[in-house]
Amino acid sequence: GGINRTYYRYLDEFYRILALKINHMTLELLNARTTFFRKAQPVEKINIELLKTLKEAFKEGVLIAINQAESTKNELQIPLFYSEDSPLSIKKRINNIDYLLGYLTYHKDLGSWTLDIEDELIGIN
């Protein structure tokens, strides 16, 4: 559960690795409390094109707060925060609604992902 800052020369590689990591961590979250008799819940792969819509936000810095994901019966919402270089600590940033960019949502019942962003700075509404 730490913070990783990674730079990639090839953006396609970045999106591919990010999608794999999000899928892996989502799978762990959704199946953390499964019992011996219960089948593990599969997680549909996230579409890389969906992540590419965050291109402008990634340039500024985005914190994908998987550890703060909220799960309901049908959804898992992963908050996304701005994380530009500044002295403001990560803990203060993720507790400040002003830095909330939106949510990456996995719909368990549909097996699909959506991006719920309302930030005109990156050209997404």
Image: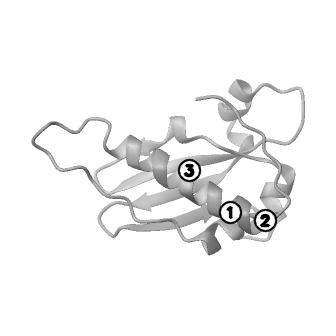
Q: CA distance from mark 3 to mark 2?
A: 15 Å
Looking at the image, which residue is at 74% across and 42% down? 98
Above or below residue 41? Residue 97 is above
Q: Are marks 1 and 2 in contact (CB under 8 Å)?
A: yes
Disc 1 and disc 2: Cα gap in Å? Answer: 6 Å
- Is label 3 in a helix, a strand or a loop? helix
Q: Quadrant of the N terminus?
A: top right
Report, in whole angstroms, how far the alpha carbon at label 1 lies from the one at label 3.
10 Å
Q: Is residue 76 left or right of residue 99?
A: left
Q: Position of residue 114 (x, y in %)?
A: 52, 67
Q: Amino acid at mark 3?
A: Lys
Q: Nearer the viewer, residue 46 or 13?
A: 13
Label 1 belongs to which residue? Answer: 15
| Relative horizontal placement of residue 4, taking residue 48 as reference (left or right) | right
Tell me which numbered mark, 3 or 2, is placed earlier along the sequence: 2
Q: Quadrant of residue 5?
A: top right
**For residue 21, which numbered disc appears in the image?**
3
For the point 17% across and 50% down, the residue is: 39
Q: In the rendered view, does 87 fall on the left or right side of 54?
A: right
Q: Position of residue 73 (x, y in %)?
A: 28, 51
Mark earlier in primary sequence (1, 3): 1
- Residue at point 33%, 70% (across, down): 110
- Residue sitting at the far right: 86
Q: Nearer the viewer, residue 19 or 57?
A: 19
Would you call the spot at circle 3 few (<14 residues within 10 Å), some (14-19), or many (20 or more)? few
Other-residue count near label 1 (Cα within 10 Å), few / some / many at <14 / 14–19 / ≥20: some
